[in-house]
Amino acid sequence: MIITELQETLVYLCETTEVVEGQGHRVELQEQPAVAVFKYDNDYYAINDKCTHGNASLCDGDVDGCEVECPFHSGAFNFITGEATAAPCTIPIKTHSIRIIENKLYLVP
């Protein structure tokens, strides 16, 4: 579902209840890379799901606070800032803005 609010085109991701703190929630999007959604300290964050070091889904990695570890080589990213925080990952992950409307998460492209 795509909605337009205040001249923004928002892309529906999921319900807030689908995202569990301490776990990644993968969302497949049409014509865009998959997104990993995280909940941390009652806020929601979205990053590209594919690790910048290898072809791994970050949703399959362990979450520690605001960091997610890649399941392939144990590199890590801060899902708030996108910063690569552990080798062998050195290239930051793309972060996405999220809007919450009536307990639904939307990606702001």
Image (cartoon, rainbow, N blue to C red):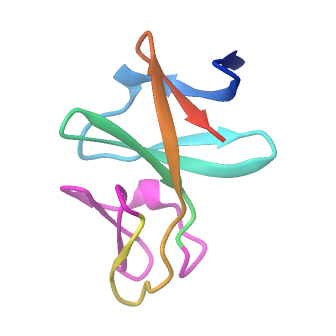
The secondary structure making up most of the magenta span is: loop
Residue 1 is at least partly visible in this image: no
Residue 32 at what x, y percent from top left?
74, 49
Q: What residue lies at 39% left-to-right and 47% top-to-bottom?
A: 24
Q: What residue lies at 52% left-to-right and 61% top-to-bottom?
A: 57
Q: The N terminus lies in which quarter of the figure?
A: top right
Point out the stretch of residues depicted in magenta: 52-81
Q: How many marks?
A: 0
Image position of 109 (left or right of 76): right
Residue closest to the eye, 68 or 61? 68
Residue 108 at what x, y percent from top left?
60, 36
Residue closest to the eye, 48 or 74? 48
Q: What residue lies at 70% left-to-right and 40% top-to-bottom?
A: 29
* Residue 76 falls in image quadrant: bottom left
Image position of 3 (left or right of 19): right
Residue 73 is at least partly visible in this image: yes
Q: Is residue 12 above or below residue 49?
A: above
Q: What residue lies at 31% left-to-right and 46% top-to-bottom?
A: 23
Residue 96 at what x, y percent from top left?
53, 49
Residue closest to the eye, 94 or 56? 94
Residue closest to the eye, 100 or 49? 100
Residue 53 at what x, y percent from top left?
53, 82
In this view, the residue farthest toward the front is 6
